[in-house]
């Protein structure tokens, strides 16, 4: 979608999704595996780290707000949930612990002169972490949580300051946007999928040929037949995504 292009800069780092750690795995080993997600990226230098969270068939969003190097404040972890379904306390505990693990890891590999935050903040990092469950517009059904997470991300990226401070939390609230607005992303996603499919019609014509009977494939294809195949591919693509009032679904 259009807002994705704004993420590829030095202000944001977006991880695919966050899931709870497996209980059977050693926590240190799990952290080292998890760390590969941001290999080569110093997350403490980013203004924001966005983590979509998935658990129990529900999506919510965590935003880690890092202070500027000259600030005396620590990072703020925000949790945005369109159903208030996920436990903010549990999520804060997990995210805080992994931030502390990353802090410990960098402390062993980075000199004090290279630390990404103000020196006093960096030395006392575990005690400087703040957490805030954010009041946000709530979904009015039980299936739009993913769209709400995308819309939270879009609006935040559009409106957030260079570095978020406590005083900026007033940007959020139950009236941040109308609850029906995230559902409009469904149409945008549908148009994007159709555009991607229409970009390579020959690919879909080939797919249809593969699906045809062997006797049909062995026969030379006339220009009329080719056009019919391309038209059929386009019709097939159009039918793949249907938009109802409530959901996007495959038919």
Image (spheres, grey):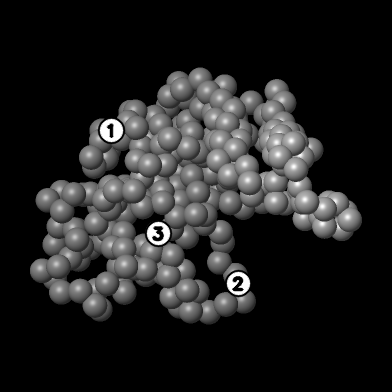
Decide if residue 165 is in sight here.
no
User: Considering depth in this image, is 91 or 239 the residue closer to the camera?
Assistant: 239
Choose top left, top right, bottom left or bottom right for residue 132.
Answer: top left
**145 w.r.t. 141: above or below:** below
Q: Which mark is residue 23?
A: 2
- CB within 8 Å, label 1 to label 2: no
Kindly state the secondary structure of the residue where label 1 is placed: helix
Q: Residue at x 38, y 35 (%)?
A: 156
Q: CA distance from mark 1 to mark 3?
A: 21 Å
**Residue 212 versus residue 194: which sits nearer the camera?**
212
* Label located before the other in sequence (1 or 3): 3
Q: Where is mark 1, residue-wise?
A: 168
Q: Quadrant of residue 197?
A: top right
Q: Decide: is 131 above or below 188.
A: below
Are dots 3 and 2 in contact, CB under 8 Å? Answer: no
Residue beneath the point at 82% across and 53% down: 219
Residue in the picture at 58% in, 31% down: 191
Task: Estimate the x, y position of residue 31 in percent, counting from the top left.
Answer: 45, 72
């Amino acid at each position: 979608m259009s807002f994705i292009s704004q993420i590829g800069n030095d202000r944001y780092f977006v991880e695919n999704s966050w899931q709870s750690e497996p209980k059977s795995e050693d926590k240190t080993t799990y952290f080292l595996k998890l760390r590969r997600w941001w290999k080569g990226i110093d997350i403490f230098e980013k203004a924001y780290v966005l983590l979509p969270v998935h658990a129990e068939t529900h999506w919510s969003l965590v935003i880690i707000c890092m202070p500027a190097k000259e600030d005396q404040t620590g990072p703020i972890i925000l949790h945005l949930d369109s159903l208030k379904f996920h436990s903010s306390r549990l999520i804060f505990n997990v995210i805080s612990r992994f931030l502390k693990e990353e802090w410990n890891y960098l402390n062993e590999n980075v000199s004090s002169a290279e630390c990404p935050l103000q020196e006093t903040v960096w030395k006392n990092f575990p005690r400087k972490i703040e957490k805030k469950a954010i009041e946000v517009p709530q979904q009015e059904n039980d299936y739009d949580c993913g769209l709400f997470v995308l819309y939270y991300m879009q609006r935040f990226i559009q409106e957030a300051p260079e570095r978020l401070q406590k005083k900026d939390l007033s940007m959020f609230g139950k009236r941040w946007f109308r609850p029906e607005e995230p559902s409009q992303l469904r149409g945008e996603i549908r148009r994007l999928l159709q555009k991607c499919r229409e970009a390579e019609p020959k690919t879909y014509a080939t797919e249809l040929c593969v699906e045809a009977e062997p006797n049909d494939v062995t026969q030379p294809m006339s220009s009329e037949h080719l056009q019919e195949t391309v038209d059929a591919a386009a019709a097939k693509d159009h039918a793949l995504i249907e938009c109802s009032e409530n959901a996007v679904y495959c038919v």
